[in-house]
Image (tube, grey):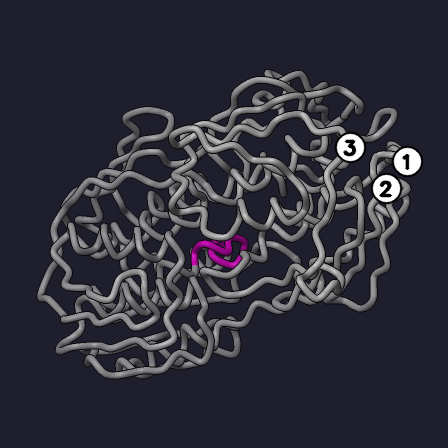
Amino acid sequence: MESFIIEGGHALQGEITPQGAKNEALQVICASLLTQDEVRICNIPDILDVNNLIQLLCDIGVKVTKHSRNEYSFKAEQLNLEYLKSDEFVRKCASLRGSVLMIGPLLGRFGNATIAEPGGDKIGRRRLDTHFLGFKNLGANFVYDEKRNVYNIQAKKLKATYMLLDEASVTGTANVIMAAVLAEGTTTIYNAACEPYIQQLCHLLNAMGANISGIASNLITIVGVKELHGATHQILPDMIEVGSFIGMAAIVGNGIRIKNVALRHLGIIPDVYKRLGVKIKVEGDDLVIPQQKHYVIESFIDGTIMTFADAPWPGLTPDLLSVLLVVATQAKGSVLIHQKMFESRLFFVDKLIDMGAQIILCDPHRAVVIGHDRNLQLRAGRMTSPDIRAGIALLIAALSAKGTSRIANIAQIDRGYEDIEKRLNALGAHITRVDD
């Protein structure tokens, strides 16, 4: 296991470019399973979760060609369908959250898939009901293997239908869309997630020969086709990383330019930071965050305390609440952070309280932050990264703290952020990776 040693108190300055979007990469890589032709994908982030998924595709027989660090081709011409039923495959899927996105393509193309409970962040209950109900609506049958603790999903031929998703699940929507593109007839999905990464998946599938309309809305219509062909796809910049860099620039920046952010796909993120008092200048497709001695949290129009709560797109993504919480510790004013989706995601605030932050953890879903207005610098500490987003939030806190901090279990950060210490050290951070 590796750790980061962070010497806090150094201002960051310069330019940084966001990596390709992790969540989009997981979806579009799995979409390559829907055709025997080659699918070429550019701007793939070189991070642990994506690399593990690529290796899993290699294991099942996908021919993977690496053209450069961030560009691959996938050709799922001859898959080892027997391996998909093996205990080894199930074990690997259980350690990788992104593996759940293989189910829809495998079910749609081959009529068969096996699923174990997937791994990933330990941030609370992450149910798969939306996926299962969607597949059932398309005519799939589920057989539970109690001995192996897996579900075998089968369908001779998926039949298109109308469905109302029980929640606007991003991975659930992606999975159902990928299953439905080869189904017989017209499928209508209402209450679909409509994040930019779902939009990107639909654009790729249409480029492969699918017939999907309603893209960017919560009502998706899919006319099934007999087969798909190859295509080339460019992954968007990661909006969560862009949001993380905005927060980092606000709390420890001395003028940072975030380049090529795909501004129109950031949604509400810049506006949320502006409500925290963070100044953001838009220059073309770049964001410039100037150095600020003070940033003041706004109140609502009626004078009540500002509240940030996660919501389906175009609402605020839950993946940024951890970073917003850290940034608020050095603002002037107070804010309520309401994490509705996951009941364990706010537990990392205990470490921030140990560092001197004034935070009241009301319950597993809500925390009130009373900003220091930089009058009290956070103290260095020893901590462990519980998940990707809490990990980057703790790293930002350590960069702003007085003294030297240590963050263990940084494999969680590596799952979502490419070469993070090298890129931040280039801006003036002092971060060292060590073996425990």
The magenta segment = 92-99
Q: Quadrant of the N terminus?
A: top right
What residue type is disc 2 on? Answer: His
Which residue is depicted at the point 36% across and 46% down?
59
Residue that label 3 marks: 398
Judged by depth in the image, the label closer to the viewer, 1 or 3, is: 1
Camera sees residue 430 = yes
What residue type is disc 3 on? Answer: Ala
CA separation, marks 3 and 2? 16 Å
Q: Residues within 10 Å of mark 2 (few under 14, many from 20)?
A: some
CA separation, marks 1 and 2? 6 Å
Quadrant hosting residue 110: bottom left
Residue that label 2 marks: 372
Left/right of residue 288 with respect to residue 363 in the rendered view: left
Q: Are marks 1 and 2 in contact (CB under 8 Å)?
A: yes
List x then y, in percent, for residue 318: 58, 57
